[in-house]
Amino acid sequence: MAALMKTWPVLLLSLVVPGPAAAAPADQSPGFWRDQGEKALRSALARQPITGRARNVILFVGDGNGVTTVTATRIFDGQSRGGRGEENRLAYEDFPYLALAKTYNTNQQTPDSAGTMTAIMTGVKTRAGVISMGPAARRADCAGSRGRELPTLLETAEQRGMNTAIVTNTRVTHATPAATYAHTPERDWEDDSLMPADARKHCADIARQLVEFGHGDGIDLVLGGGRRHFLPVGEPDPEYPRRTGRRRDGRNLVAEWQSRYPEGRFIWNREQFKTLDPAAPGPVLGLFSPSHMAFEADREQAGAAEPSLSAMVGGALDLLAARDRGYFLMVEGGRIDHAHHYGNAHRALVEGQEFSRAVQVALDRVDLRETLVIVTADHSHVFTMAGYPTRGNAILGKVVGNDEHGEPRRQPTLADDGLPFTTLGYANGYGFGHGDDIHQRLRRGGSTGRRDLSGIDVTDKNFYQEALVPLRRGERAETHGGEDVAVYAAGPWAHLVHGVREQNYLYYVIRHALDPAP
Ligand SMILES: [Mg+2]
Ligand SMILES: [Zn+2]
């Protein structure tokens, strides 16, 4: 290919459109990098830790938002705004302090969200699948786990008279949000229909634990999806009347919540969310979907009933600001993880971009002298960015590399099998077959080899990035990654976020920020 290009440079160049970097960008001069470096140094030297008590804490958890995802999202976000991308900064990338967190569970090298969020919320690492219970609790062992409940930061905040809020775009009963308020040896017990009979007798499902939450004056605001776990079988969903609740105990937990909190407001669509009076008293329960909320990339087509993650964060902060006490707010960008599990980088990056927007909404409203903001991921994914693409190459595109002079080539780089490949890929997952069922492909006598992507638009929303190891389609297909995740922090005691830490360390930082030792 290189030889061909040497022989026919004029012909090849005349065949292709001009690249993005036609005019020499400013960063081609040494002065640009010297100025940039000096400026960064001055700002680091001027940095002073904030050691006053944190009035408020906002914890942002990007589920599955590992470092590769952050880098790719940064470039995607920059390119979607017309830049080359690499120079872009996400909202939390200007935070002054950063640590790496080791994410393993007590019984699992590569962790799950239940165990990791338990570490952050209770200060104790535990087993995968277990929610805010100690590591001696065996998964799904109701009887054996009793008495192993661990107090969470959100519960403690309520007990201290703070306001509390949970915002997620997954079901509010899903592992990450559940670890803020529930205690269960099995993350899948989102309602009673998902529990074995003996567990139903002695353990409460997660939706019930949310409604029966008994600390302080209750959680001030909960926004997310998951209506089906709150409504009984036969009770029509308010938005999709043909779909009914899932509960087998006949309980309507929305009605129970309403009678428990007579001033409480239950909302289930974007219109009700938009017209919510943030100054009115009483708690708010917003359940905007029967299951998870839509991917941000699909939200406008999904029936317009759902607010975005950033809009929900804005609404939550309006409500919390209207109440005169400090608050603990947990925000989960929960669907970065799901898009990765599907092997679909496009949706994952759009989710990551919306997660950054949600952080920006918070930064625009809070005073960092009194509000500790932590942004982290619970775990990573087997997501890679590779192949020597040239500067500004479309992050979702095929790798187009540089020539022997470091100048961009015009055609995709070819692998040893003569086929092009994308910058983003997965070590395992559904994309092995690019949407084909691998078993069907083998039955039809097809090969398990790579497919020719030459004529395929790999930036399409529904393209599944190539994966090395085939795993079936679905929410638990492509797997989590086991490497450390970044923790970004700003505000009071944010300087404690440094070094390589066990993930449960975050609990102690937050606790200290809220109540510094004299
Ligand atoms: Mg989650
Ligand atoms: Zn996951």
Image (spheres, grey):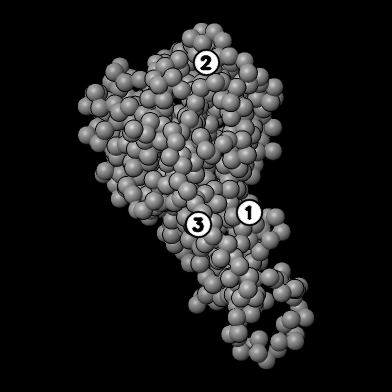
Query: Disc 1 marks which amino acid?
Result: Asp
On the picture, is 352 further left or further right than 28? left
Q: Within the image, what quadrant is residue 183 found in?
A: top left
Query: Disc 2 marks which amino acid?
Result: Val
Say if 38 sits above or below 334 in the image. below
Query: Disc 3 marks which amino acid?
Result: Ala
Give the label, 1 or 3, closer to the camera.
Answer: 3
Return the disc, 1 or 2, that comes first in the chain's sequence: 1
In this orientation, does residue 188 appear?
Answer: no
On the picture, is 430 further left or further right than 5? left
Which element type, helix, strand or loop, lies under badge 2? helix
Residue at 42%, 47% in the rendered image:
495
Q: Within the image, what quadrant is residue 85 found in?
A: bottom right
Return the disc, 3 or 2, that comes first in the chain's sequence: 3
Say if 30 sits above or below 434 in the image. below
Q: Which residue is mark 1?
A: 77
Which element type, helix, strand or loop, lies under badge 3? helix
Return the disc, 1 or 3, that comes first in the chain's sequence: 3
Relative image position of residue 100 (x, y in whole percent): 39, 52
Residue at 50%, 57% in the rendered image:
44
In this orientation, does residue 426 appear?
Answer: yes
Q: Are marks 1 and 3 in contact (CB under 8 Å)?
A: no
Cα distance in 3D space between marks 1 and 3: 26 Å
Q: Is residue 412 or residue 52 the one in the foreground?
A: 52
On the picture, is 460 further left or further right than 42? right
Relative image position of residue 105 (x, y in whole percent): 30, 44
Residue at 56%, 10% in the rendered image:
263
* Few, some or many residues within 10 Å of mark 3 (<14, 14–19, 20+): few
Q: Which residue is mark 3?
A: 44
Counting every numbered tag in the picture gives 3
Label annotation for residue 254: 2
